[in-house]
Amino acid sequence: YATWWIRQAITRALADQSRTIRIPVHMVETINRFKQVERRLIQDLGREPLPEEMSSELGLPVDKVRHIKKISQETVSLETSVGDDEEDSKLQDFIEDTRAISPDKSAGRELLKDYVKEAMKDLTPREQKILEMRFGLVDGVGHTLEEVGREFDVTRERIRQIEAKALEKIQQKEIIHKLRDY
């Protein structure tokens, strides 16, 4: 009788502490049963069992079997070495950072910045600052006419007039054709 309690205590401790992502104890027991049945079917069939076959053996719906298979997978560290050689290739080296700006987009942005600077170089410093604030050219945050007006201590209507005049000056330049591509 004591061995049963000891076995249960060990099983529960393993369930609670053996994984990076904790899975509830009842699911760990289900996963263990799933793996036992899967191993037995692999031996009997000589191949990987289908979800339908696992479903009939376990007495569970097919979608539940697929879910159990999915959560039973072990986590893998991004620091895991990849390949047979002794080089420092890690799994993380092969996973794309979708938040990073691609080199071609980065180059395009730099080119656009250069074109905008070129287009704005003949404007007065005040006109430049107003356009930078309105379109978020420096900090990436476009400001309202009201906010820019407070910065320059003038009305929003005056900011609108200065902005329109500055944009009109830019449209007279030859470089505007390059900017239209963006």
Image (tube, helix red, strand yellow):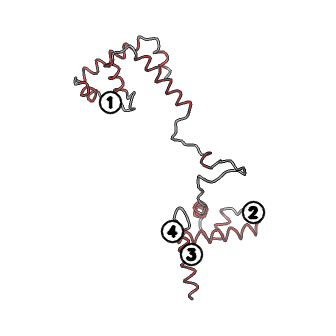
The alpha-carbon separation of the residues under discs 3 and 1 comes to 60 Å
Between residue 159 and residue 80, name the one nearer to us.
80
Picture quadrant of residue 136:
top left
Q: Amino acid at mark 1?
A: His
The disc label shown at residue 11, or none: 3
Q: Choose the circle earlier in sequence order: 3 or 1.
A: 3
Q: Choose the circle earlier in sequence order: 2 or 1.
A: 2
Mark 4 = which residue?
24
Q: Amino acid at mark 3?
A: Thr
| Above or below for 112 versus 79 | above
Q: Choose the circle earlier in sequence order: 4 or 3.
A: 3
Q: x, y percentage for residue 24?
A: 51, 68
Q: State the residue lying farthest toward the right.
A: 46
Say which residue appears at 33% left-offset and 18% top-offset: 125
Helix, strand or loop at mark 4: loop
Image marks 2 and 1: residues in contact by CB distance under 8 Å:
no
Say which residue appears at 66% left-offset and 63% top-offset: 52
Q: x, y percentage for residue 169?
A: 37, 13
Badge 1 density bin: few <14, some 14–19, many ≥20, Cα 10 Å = some
